[in-house]
Every structure is written in structure tokens, then in C-alpha cells.
Amino acid sequence: MNISSRDLTMQESPIRKLVPYADRAKKEGTKVYHLNIGQPDIKTPDSMLKAYSEVPQVIAYGPSNGLAEYREKLAAYYSEIGKGIESDNVFVTTGGSEAIIFTLMSALSPGDEVMIPEPFYTNYNGFAAMAGVSVVPVTTSIDDGFHLPSIKVFEEKLTDKTKAIMFSNPGNPTGTVFSREELEGLILFAKKHDLYLISDEAYREFTYGERTAVSIMEFEGIDDNAILIDSVSKRYSACGARIGWIVTRNTKLLNLILKFGQARLCPPTVDQLASLAAMDTPRSYFKEVVREYKGRRDFAYDELISIPGVIAKKPEGAFYMVLALPVKDADDFAKWLLSDFRIDGETTMVAPAEGFYSTNGLGKNQIRLAYVLNKDDLKKAINIIREGLKVYPGRV
């Protein structure tokens, strides 16, 4: 029997597709350092963990748009960023993934196009395929740290099917933080052409001194255009909680999002209660987390650029970096590390960056690393890459 034609547009995840290689290595007794996935080892806040031990006797359905108390608290948080955000402007979802899927399905129609600066979070491709929309990539370069190209490049990609621009800021997979001037250029372009601006801000708390992340909610005059995506996954080191949300002042858009939300009933009640409790986390927690990630970033970057042939720009936020390797095929190198290379019974897993691009052929010699391990483990993991490159048969 045939399967859906979506098989032609749904890609494998470059973050997870090498899992069988890693599983095989582990079965053979090899320790694998995971730099391929953004799974923090930072402890989840105590307030959130405590809430999981205090669940109600009956775990009931909640409202389709999220628990009222949680939406009110989120609205208060965002009111410190942008004016006029109330609980009715917040829609709670099952993770940030569902937030993006609902947004694409509500803001765009099948056959429409969304522009996305590449490299981008690979699942954007999958979400677009689910919504029946096409991704139009706008290529950025490692040479300037993956910052946005001129608006002229966006103009050249514009068609009558273009309905939105989507981006992450700070960026996944690059760690790039777009400047206020870059965002202002996008806003003028979006207003001129009546486009939605979908800003994925899951890493907004994580910047390291070079530049502060600017939220799309800070700008005025774009109430109908601006859509913010966020989640608890990275902010509270709670990736398995699967709570995200959409923030927008566009009430017409929210009405359609609600219809999709009603069709899936409600976001997880227990995880919302835990996420609500997490919002009482003291600022000292975030200061310590940012300090830790900054130290890891600086250490990882210094180690990596000391490897002959490696090209990288220091990321300004999130906890990722994309680097070019002196190899013909980074995908093959990543598989080789898992299948053929060991140092004292250990190896490293990375994510080939080609899968973060939509343009064929780009990123073939690049990888994405997530510096989510402690410095001792980072040192060992990066040393495996360093020594592996010395003997890898596909080196150039």
C-alpha cells in the first residue's frame, strides 16, 4: 500500500537520525558524549519539581487555551517586555512544537510560503510540511556569524505566496542574536508586504554579554503581524514537560488557533501546574545558569578553534554553535565517530549541519554542537573530535 505524499517533504532529524549508531556503540560498551541535542544537564528548578509531587487527586481536562492562572502569570511576564499583553493574548500549547504548528496552520494556508533564515531549527521543515506550506530559505553565512543578509535578499525571494517570516532569536542552531537594527529591517519589510513575523524566543534568557536578545513584542505598530513562540523546555531545563505557548495581539488569528486547540482538547494539566510553579523561580537561578553556559561556551569555542582547519564564530546566545570542519562530508564524519573511532572506550555524537539547511548542498562540511555538558565532559568530547580529525580518512 502507498503512504502519504508527505513522505516526500518530511525530512529526518539531523539531531536524532544517528541515534541507531549511538545505540550500537553503547551496546558495545562505548561511552557516548552527546553534543548532538540541546538537552541541558542543568537541574530543573525545585519549585517545578515540588509541584509534580503535589498533583490533584483527579487530573482533569483543562481549558483548550490553557489554565487561566497560568496564562495570567505569563501575560504579566510579557507585559514587562511589551505593552498591552493580557491573558487573552496567550495560548498555551503542548510544547513549543505545537505552538509553531498551530501558528503555521492558522497564519498560512496550504500552498503558502514562509521565509526562514537558514540554517534553522530543522523541525521547522517538518512543521511546514504538516501545515502544507513551503519553506523559502534565506541563506546566512558563517563568515559573519550567521547574521541576516540585507533586506534586498528578502525582497528577491518574495512571491505572491509569501505570507510570513519565521526565525529563532537567539538562534538554533547558530547561537546568533539578531540586533535591534536587524529586526527593525524585518519589521519594515513585513509591514510593507503584510507578512506575519513569527519569532521563536525559546532561548531569550540565554545571552552572554555581547548582545541582549530583543523580543518581537517590544516593537509597536505590528499588533497584527507579530507572533511570539516560547516554551519551558530550555528556560527551566524541563524539555520533557512539553509546555509551550503563543503570544500575539492578533485576536482574529487567536480565534482560529483556538479551534485547533479545541480539536486536540487541552495542553497537559499536570505540566501546566508545574510550569506555573516554575514561574516563581528566583532570578538568581537564571543568573547562575547563564554564568554556567557562558563559561561552557567560552571553553568550547576556545578549544574548537584551536583545532587545525576548524572555522567557527563565537555564538552570542542559546547553547549551540555551528562550525565548519576540514572534511568533505560532516554527516559521514559524525557516523565514523560513532562507528569507528574511540579514545579510552569513549566517543562523541554531533549533529551534521546539512539538515539545518533547506538549500541543497549547503552545510555539508558543518556540524552543530550543543555545549550542554559540564566542562570536564566537554573537554573529553572535543578532544575526541580533535584526535578523530587527525586520522579521519575523509579529511581535506
Image (cartoon, helix red, strand yellow):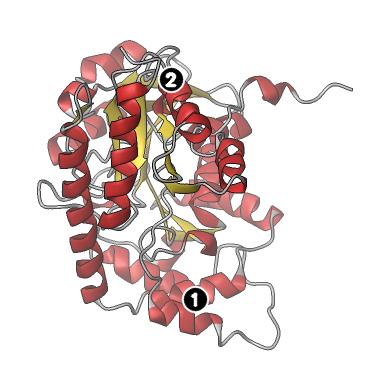
Between 336 and 125, the one nearer to me in the picture: 336
Position in image of residue 185 (x %, y %):
19, 30
The kind of residue on which mark 1 rests is: Ala
> Looking at the rendered structure, which numbered label has been put on residue 274?
1
The kind of residue on which mark 2 rests is: Val
Question: Of circles 1 and 2, which is in front?
Answer: 1
Q: Residue at x 30, y 32 (%)?
A: 387
Position in image of residue 146 (x %, y %):
23, 28
User: Along the horizontal axis of the image, is 46 left or right of 77?
Assistant: right
Q: Residue at x 25, y 44 (%)?
A: 221
Residue 172 in view of the camera: no
| Above or below for 97 versus 188 | below
User: Along the horizontal axis of the image, is 365 left or right of 219?
Assistant: right
Between 248 and 238, the one nearer to me in the picture: 238
Q: Which residue was labeled with disc 2? A: 136
> Looking at the rendered structure, which numbered label has been put on residue 219?
none
